[in-house]
Amino acid sequence: MTSSREFDATRLDVETFAGEGAVLQGEWPLRDLPRLRDSASTDVPLEPADVVRWKARGERVANVRPELWLQVEADTSIALQCQRCLAPIEVGVVVDRRFGFVAGEAAAAELDATSDDDIIALTRALDLRVLIEDELLLALPLVPMHAVCPAPLAIRDADHTVDEAANPFAALAALKSDRNGAH
């Protein structure tokens, strides 16, 4: 069932939206999601084509607690900093989550503890953009890394440059001999 009513994604009336089985979808520029934008590598400027695509579908399920549900899907691609070579790495981020809504924080906490889905206290106006940004942030890799870095990282100390491919014990021996010679 598709609703003829207009819904605002930044002030979503979840009870009405779910009750009507409504669907909302669209795109937001990545630059309009400040916390996600701030996670991006500063080496790659954001382009107007860098967007978050999203869709939300409401559903009311009778005789089930919670009875109000929101299915949220979102995806984007973001340049993060590789933790191995420090170069940018393009990462695809996909979210497909289901949220149940109940009246009151206590009921939400009680049901959330036993449910595989997230249970949230029903509010008058849900900011869907904030919810989707939260979920995308949670879906980011903890340690983004290239499978194979584009260029080996050179490790430098004050007097030497040691290639990453070099034997680490040879590098240690060189440092040790430098210290012994300096006495």
Image: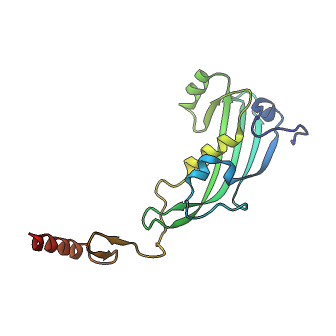
Pick the quarter of the image with the N terminus.
top right
Q: In the image, is residue 58 above or below residue 82?
A: above
Q: Nearer the viewer, residue 38 or 164?
A: 38
Pick the quarter of the image with the C terminus.
bottom left
Q: Is residue 83 left or right of residue 168?
A: right
- Figure quadrant of residue 48: bottom right
- Figure quadrant of residue 47: bottom right
Q: Is residue 10 left or right of residue 91?
A: right
Residue at horizontal 77%, vertical 40%?
9
Where residue 32 sits in the image (x, y, percent)?
A: 69, 49
Where residue 4 sits in the image (x, y, percent)?
A: 91, 39
Where residue 134 sits in the image (x, y, percent)?
A: 60, 43
- Figure quadrant of residue 15: top right
Q: In the image, is residue 134 above or below residue 14?
A: below
Q: Is residue 141 left or right of residue 173?
A: right
Residue at horizontal 74%, vertical 30%?
125
Q: Nearer the viewer, residue 132 or 110?
A: 132
Where residue 43 sits in the image (x, y, percent)?
A: 55, 64
